[in-house]
Image (cartoon, rainbow, N blue to C red):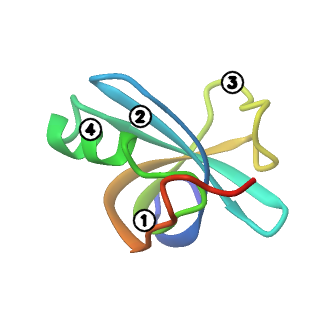
Amino acid sequence: MAGKEVTVRGRVHNIRATNKTCFIELREQYDTVQANLFANDTSTGMVKFAGKIPKETIVQLKAKVSKADKEVKSCTLSKIELTILEIWVVNRSAPMLPF
């Protein structure tokens, strides 16, 4: 599926963000996949918005599938990455989770 555009919906498992990059781990049941967002490819406002999404929030992504340069060890789908084209918050979680 490398090079194809897909629509994915899942929970935000973890986010690692800086001013110019954002890596989002999406979870659906037991599988996780990494999605990338770079300021070179899109606006810095979109990167900042994505970096502030709370964990366990349900998001929907329109993304392009690509083969990972090196294996993503933190994800179960470690051989692919998603390059985010659009991101939509479907259901925002509470900022302070009880667990």
Identity of the residue drawn at 44% across and 68% down = 92
Separation of residues labelled 3 and 4 (CA atoms): 25 Å
Checking the image for residue 88, the label placed there is none
Dot 3: element: loop
Dot 1: element: strand
Checking the image for residue 22, the label placed there is 2
Q: Nearer the viewer, mark 4 or mark 2?
A: 4
Identity of the residue drawn at 73% across and 53% down = 32
Look at mark 1 in the image and give the residue it sits on: 61
Look at mark 4 in the image and give the residue it sits on: 48
Question: Can residue 67 be spotted in the picture?
Answer: yes
Which sits in the foreground, 61 or 3?
A: 61
Separation of residues labelled 1 and 3 (CA atoms): 22 Å
Give whichever of discs 4 and 1 has the lower sequence position: 4
Image position, residue 75 (x, y; %): 76, 42
Instruction: Look at the numbered discs 2 and 1 and tell me whether their residues touch, using CB distance below 8 Å.
Output: no
Dot 4: element: helix
Instruction: Look at the numbered discs 4 and 2 and tell me whether their residues touch, using CB distance below 8 Å.
Output: no
Separation of residues labelled 2 and 3 (CA atoms): 17 Å
User: Is residue 43 rendered to the left or right of residue 14?
Assistant: left
Q: Nearer the viewer, mark 3 or mark 4?
A: 4
Examine the rendered structure and indicate whether residue 46 appears above or below residue 73.
below
Separation of residues labelled 2 and 1 (CA atoms): 14 Å
Checking the image for residue 70, the label placed there is 3
Image position, residue 85 (x, y; %): 31, 56
Image quadrant containing the N terminus:
bottom right
User: Is residue 81 rendered to the left or right of residue 76?
Assistant: left
User: Is residue 7 rendered to the left or right of residue 13?
Assistant: left
Which amino acid type is marked by label 2?
A: Cys
Separation of residues labelled 4 and 2 (CA atoms): 8 Å
Q: Nearer the viewer, mark 1 or mark 3?
A: 1
